[in-house]
């Protein structure tokens, strides 16, 4: 077997602008509406910070909720101090006798979301995340009744309320053991930069709450509550194909390396 050719990595790097590590930022390549452009540095307005991110509660299943002729709600959640999204794809490494090399087999992706916010006199976090999934609800002293956007319940052809154990007292919902909380919800994350340009929107379907925490300490000026959730699917919000993308008007899965005009209809049609 002939030896593998040596590759000079520096030859693979675009140095048209020069590499001035003392006086310039590393060039940032990105896809613009006009194709591949190069910027010498990231502008301050391109930075995404916590104030330009919006978290909202919606239905667990967008497709199912969209069947309702009255539509559905996506309700912003305020006073969130900390939000974290995590995804894990387990990998299995397989070895074989007779070789030093191995195979890596990807598994199923598992994701989770945690939210933490100030505890105040208003809908608690457990109630806030259900504002998009619950279509209508009421409660007696013994039971909680609700209609869900993603899981309608029909009796004799008419949508009816489902009955559960009460979920809380006043605006404080803490009874995670109630079957009410076995109904999943959806969460939307909206990302903008400081110039009010949309960076992207992502929706998480099938979110189920696994943990509720309420922290109380004698030296705390403000109490906090938090929840941990696991979701079924991460769903990017798209309104156009990459070739039809217009910045500020629609959302598309932008190309990584190809120009925007690159469009292979054969690949789509098979």
Image (cartoon, helix red, strand yellow):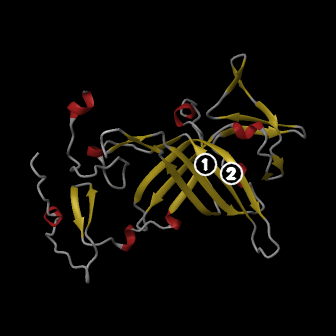
Q: Residue at x 38, y 48 (%)?
A: 251
Residue lying furthest bottom in this view?
A: 22
Q: Is residue 89 left or right of residue 9?
A: right
Residue 122, x across and y down, in percent: 75, 58
Q: Residue at x 76, y 75 (%)?
A: 221
Mark 1, other Cα within 10 Å: few <14 / some 14–19 / many ≥20: many
With respect to residue 54, does 40 lie above or below?
A: below
**Which quadrant is home to the C terminus?**
top left
Residue 187, x across and y down, in percent: 57, 48
Q: Residue at x 48, y 67 (%)?
A: 49
Asked if the residue at tag 1 contacts the one at tag 2, i.e. Cβ–Cβ closer than 8 Å, the answer is yes
Mark 2, other Cα within 10 Å: few <14 / some 14–19 / many ≥20: some
Look at the numbered disc 2 and give the secondary structure of its residue: helix
**Which quadrant is home to the N terminus?**
top left
Q: Quadrant of residue 17?
A: bottom left
How far apart marks 2 and 1 lie (CA) works out to: 7 Å
Q: Is residue 31 left or right of residue 224?
A: left
Residue lying furthest right in this view?
A: 141
Residue 265, x across and y down, in percent: 22, 33
Look at the numbered disc 1 and give the secondary structure of its residue: strand
Residue 189, x across and y down, in percent: 52, 53
Q: Residue at x 35, y 47 (%)?
A: 252
Q: Is residue 142 left or right of residue 107?
A: right
Which is more N-terminal, label 1 or label 2?
1
Q: Quadrant of residue 64?
A: top right
* Mark number displayed over residue 254: none
The residue pinned by badge 1 equals: 57
* Mark number displayed over residue 128: 2
Residue lying furthest front in this view?
A: 98
**Number of callouts:** 2
């Amino acid at each position: 077997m002939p030896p593998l050719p040596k590759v000079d990595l520096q030859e693979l790097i675009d140095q048209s602008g020069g590499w001035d590590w003392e006086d310039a930022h590393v060039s940032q390549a990105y896809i613009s509406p006009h194709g591949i452009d190069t910027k010498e540095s990231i502008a301050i307005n391109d930075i995404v910070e916590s104030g330009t991110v919006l978290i909202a509660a919606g239905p667990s299943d967008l497709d199912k909720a969209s069947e309702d002729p009255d539509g559905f709600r996506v309700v912003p959640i305020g006073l969130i101090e900390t939000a974290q999204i995590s995804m894990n794809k387990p990998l299995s490494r397989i070895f074989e006798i007779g070789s030093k090399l191995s195979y890596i087999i990807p598994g199923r992706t598992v994701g989770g979301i945690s939210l933490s916010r100030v505890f105040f006199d208003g809908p608690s976090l457990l109630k806030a995340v259900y504002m998009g999934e619950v279509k209508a609800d009421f409660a007696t002293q013994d039971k909680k009744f609700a209609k869900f956007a993603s899981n309608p319940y029909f009796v004799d052809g008419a949508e009816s309320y489902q009955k559960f154990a009460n979920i809380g007292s006043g605006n404080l919902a803490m009874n995670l053991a109630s079957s009410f909380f076995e109904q999943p919800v959806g969460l939307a994350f909206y990302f903008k930069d400081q110039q009010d340009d949309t960076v992207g929107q992502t929706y998480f379907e099938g979110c189920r709450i696994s943990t509720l925490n309420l922290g109380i300490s004698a030296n705390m000026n403000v109490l906090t509550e938090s929840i941990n959730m696991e979701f079924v699917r991460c769903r990017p919000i798209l309104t156009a194909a990459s070739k039809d993308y217009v910045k500020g008007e629609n959302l598309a899965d932008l190309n990584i390396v190809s120009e925007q005009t690159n469009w292979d209809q054969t690949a789509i049609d098979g």
